[in-house]
Image: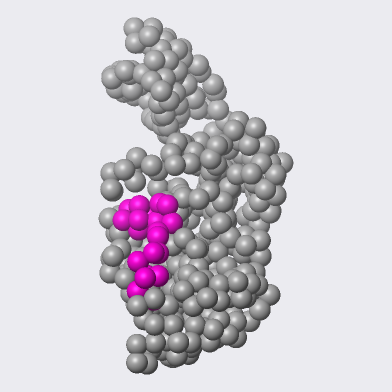
Amino acid sequence: MSLLVTVTGRDHPGVTAALMDVLDAHGATVDDVEQVVVHGRLLLGVVIAGEGDGHAVRGDLARVAGDLGVELEFTPLEDAEPEPQQRHHVVVLGAPLPPAALAAVTRTLAGCGANIERVVRLSSWPAQSFELVVSGGDTAVLRTALAACAVQQQVDVAVERASIYRRAKRLVVMDVDSTLVQGEVIEMLAAEAGCLDEVAAVTTAAMSGELDFEQSLRARVKLLEGLPVDAVDRVRGQVRLTPGGRTLVRTLKRLGWTVGIVSGGFTAVTDDLQRELGLDHALANVLEVVDGRLTGQLLGPVVDRAAKAAALRRFAEEEGLMPEQTVAIGDGANDLDMLAAAGLGIAFNAKQVVRAAADTAISVPFLDAVLFLLGIPRDEVEQAL
């Protein structure tokens, strides 16, 4: 028989040390310790293997606890170890994140046979997020049930199996248009060429998976024939990063991650982004220019959904990483293969077809919220800035 000693009360230096001194004096063996402090309130749990002279240990612990101003609770435990269960990390994120949403998520977890072992706040800004470590439950069942719950509660919920790869992910590959940057560059070019409405309609259909991406891209680029390169330069100057994009890249880089972009857009924009952000890898389409004007043609193979997935695998191989150590972020149908190839596929403010296929989705407008899904709390983000 073992004994669980639960300590609660106002936290102050020396509480744990004083209690451990008592246990040492009685020759007790400590099997497990967990401690958390929430806004100055202590919760400490200590499991003692075998009680020995149980009454003496309890008496001395109670005496010291009284001197320290904390309360104790003693719970006898069966010595048999519980059967190990699969653990998951469940991140709940919202702006705002009301108690009703947390209640719905935790109720859904219970309904799936998952038990919450620990809850940690990851961030309060720019979105509020909490990480729940849960035991039990099937990964596919949890994702399906929590995805439905997230839609109903208008929050985001990510589910990942607890494994060595979660903290070992070391490559993030992003889409560019409507992910790393705001809007679609080809539509900005089309506005310069006077064919915005026609190009925008094709873009919407292509990103929703209704059209073949390569055919639709070539058709849209054809409409840009004759556009002078100075118009391309103007568009390049108008491109704006998605809020949180710079923070995401800078934080990942300072934490030692590798970051790349793959785009169905154009090197006319991605080359500048790679230089500005210090990105490790980049792949995009090349617009043909003759005599200072676009010809309406592309040079080389088109970067479509298959090419994006191949690029992610190639970047990982060049960095000596396994697919499980990669993260992909995108919003359109041409990102689906890349999201599927990654260890974690994240749909960012994505079309419904992409949200349904991705491992998890983000609907808040801040790209740095991805960091919380990776288990990186806001205080570590601040330290990396």
Seen from this angle, which residue lies furthest front? 194
Which residues, given as a range, are shown in magenta? 232-252
Q: Is residue 130 magenta?
A: no
Q: Position of residue 254 (x, y in %)?
A: 27, 55
Q: Residue at x 62, y 62 (%)?
A: 351
Q: Is residue 248 magenta?
A: yes
10 and 241: which one is in front? 241
52 and 179: which one is in front? 179
Q: Position of residue 330 (x, y in %)?
A: 52, 65
Question: Does residue 44 appear in the picture of this structure?
Answer: no
Q: Residue at x 50, y 68 (%)?
A: 184
User: For residue 219, which quarter of the picture?
Assistant: bottom right
User: For residue 53, which quarter of the picture?
Assistant: top left
| Depicted 113 relative to depicted 315: above or below | above
**Overall secondary structure of the magenta section:** helix
Q: How many marks?
A: 0
| Depicted 84 relative to depicted 226: above or below | above
Q: Position of residue 142 (x, y in %)?
A: 65, 50
| Depicted 29 relative to depicted 330: above or below | above
Q: Residue at x 28, y 44 (%)?
A: 383
Q: Left of 164 or right of it: where is 355? A: right
327 and 135: which one is in front? 327
Q: Residue at x 64, y 40 (%)?
A: 105
